Each structure stands twice: as structure tokens, then as C-alpha cells.
Amino acid sequence: MKYFSILLLFFCSFQNTIGNVEKLDKEYGFRNHSFGTLISAFKNLVFTGGIGEVKNFENRADDLSFGDYKANKISYFFYKNKFYRYVIEIKGIENRKGILAWFQSQYGPGALKNAKTNRYVWMGKEVIADYVETPTGAIIEVSSKQYEDLIESGKDRAE
């Protein structure tokens, strides 16, 4: 009976995590923009850097709130002018704990990949998210697997 209870607990936890990762896949983007959206659909972006076909921007008018906690900034990344990744930078221990709790309440607990850096990963079918703590805060990166694979493989460079 003890083993059955443990197995049932594991299964319920697994189902909850899958369901929440499916939510991340279903959203497939951030706020009102799906991954793959052209940069022209975004407003108030300020160019902050880039390498080759990858460009990154900030929207300095962004709402940085996640529940009762605030991020320091949100960066948007585009490949060939299509949105494929966003990065949330968090400053302060209270903010990082609060935003991690908010993120986990939305997408499940994630898989703890490194206890030393408190790194969590959410692997959906379409979207991957990564949370890692820094000495002064944390960083959350969320991106489209399709675009990450495309950039990494370089298969479309002949286009």
C-alpha cells in the first residue's frame, strides 16, 4: 500500500506538471504576442543589441509586475524580425522568490536541474523556460523550441 501511495503521489505531481507545461506551450509567447510575431507588431521597443540575425530590444513602458513582485527589465529577442524569446531579469532576493513562486503557480514546479544555482527548467513540446538565480537576483528565459533549433542548426541561412 505504501508503494501504491508513493506511485499515486508521483503520478498526480507528474500530471500537474505536464498540464502546466502545456499551458506554457498553449500561450506560445508572452502577453499579447505569440512567438513568430513580426517585430512591426510591437510598440515602444528600444534596440539594445544583437548579433547577426538576432536582435534584442526592451520596451521601457512594460509592466514589470508579476503578482506583487517586480522584475528589473524584460528583453525581447527577434530572429529575422520574428519574436522568439523573452528574458526577465529580476533584482533582489524577495523579488526573485516571489516571481519564481508566481511562475511556478502558472506553469508548475519545473524540474530542478542544479540545486547549487537553484536552476529550474520547464520543457514543453513547443516552449522551453529556464530559471536561474544569480548573486543579486535571477533570470528567466522563455523561448520557442522551433526558433532555437532553427538558429542553432543554421538551416535557413540560405534563404
Image (cartoon, helix red, strand yellow):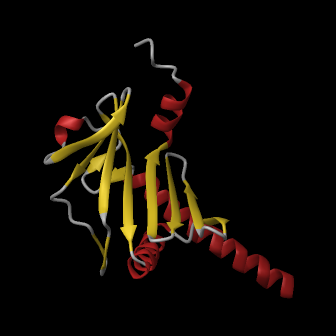
In the rendered view of the protein, which quadrant contains the C terminus?
Answer: top left
Against 48, is 93 above or below?
below
- The image quarter containing residue 158 is top left
Q: Residue at x 44, y 70 (%)?
A: 137
In the rendered view of the protein, which quadrant contains the N terminus?
Answer: bottom right
Q: Residue at x 31, y 34 (%)?
A: 82
Against 54, is 5 above or below?
below
Q: Residue at x 44, y 53 (%)?
A: 142
Q: Residue at x 57, y 71 (%)?
A: 16
- Where does the image place residue 10, in percent across and percent down from the top left? 71, 75
Against 113, is 85 above or below?
above
- Where does the image place residue 44, in percent across and percent down from the top left? 13, 48
Question: Relative to 113, is 46 on the left or the right?
Answer: left
Question: Relative to 3, is 69 on the left or the right?
Answer: left
- Where does the image place residue 6, in percent across and percent down from the top left? 78, 81
Question: Relative to 73, is 148 on the left or the right?
Answer: right
Residue lying at the far top of the rendered structure? 158
